[in-house]
Amino acid sequence: MRGLMSTSNHSHGGAHVAHHFRDAEHQFDSAKQGIWLFMVTEILMFGGLFVGYAIFHTIYPQMFSEGASHLDWRLGFVNTLVLIASSYTMAMSIHHLQKNEKDQAVTKLWITVLCGVIFMVIKAFEYKAKFDHGLLPGHLLNVEHAHAVHANLGMYYGFYFCMTGLHGLHVLIGMGLIIWLAIRAKRGDFGADYFTPVEGVGIFWHIVDLIWIFLFPLLYLVG
């Protein structure tokens, strides 16, 4: 892909090169390095939550197992499949742009947004069920209503809401960026000569999807 990008940008991408870059390849490499550096900070942020989860799961394994028993793993599994599908359509949108297939690229971008909507709707139903049953984080946990065996079950739901809520926020941000890309792609701003913004947002979206692949077994399948 990089070879195609370099060749194409050298021949057609001059109009997209900012004045402080030597050429299109320099701009593309800098943009890609920048997005990866940003994603490292995102991974470090979630990594802190994963470390905290691991520590307290080691101390209270039965409590974490009880918390997971209140979750519907089938909904989590469906959301996993939805995000995997969205990663595929996001990658295909870049593939179509590399071949100057604008309409197909726009369609794939909108399908990716639709997958994000499905994910968030399912997550909203999950959150509502937890609220209705008093399964809330920390001291907000309704022990009697939730029929909690462990009084500190709120700790598990503290991790659950913090980790899934932060992830959901990233999904919403990603959806907003992809909508912006779809509008620009429809306008003809991207093609084989220039698709750096799509590449950058694609990396962000793939990392968000990857984080969920770790969250699903940790929260839903923990025993």
Image (spheres, rainbow, N blue to C red):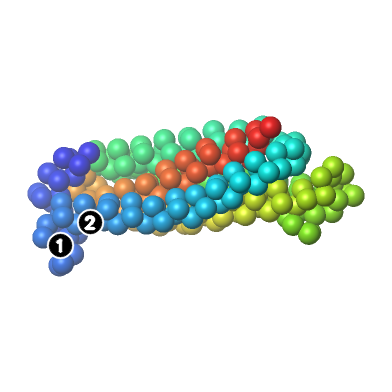
Q: Residue furthest bottom?
A: 19
User: Which numbered tag is attached to residue 204?
Assistant: none
Query: Which quarter of the rendered picture does the N terminus lie within?
Result: top left
Asked whether residue 168 is in view, the answer is no
Residue nearest the viewer, comparing 220 with 153: 153
Residue at the image position 53 percent from the left and 39 percent from the top:
214
Q: Amino acid at mark 2?
A: Ser
Horizontal side of residue 155 vs 40, given as left or right: right
Horizontal side of residue 9 vs 86, given as left or right: left
User: Which numbered tag is attached to residue 30?
Assistant: 2
Quarter holding residue 192: top left
Residue at the image position 66 percent from the left and 35 percent from the top:
222
Horizontal side of residue 59 vs 132, given as left or right: left
Kindly indicate whether the residue at mark 1 contacts the one at mark 2 (C-beta within 8 angstroms): yes
Label 1, on which residue? 21
Residue nearest the viewer, comparing 197 with 65: 65
Q: Where is residue 158 drawn, in percent x and y?
A: 68, 53
Query: Which quarter of the rendered picture does the C terminus lie within?
Result: top right
Q: Where is residue 70 drawn, in percent x and y?
A: 76, 39
Q: Amino acid at mark 1?
A: Phe
Residue nearest the viewer, comparing 61 with 190: 61
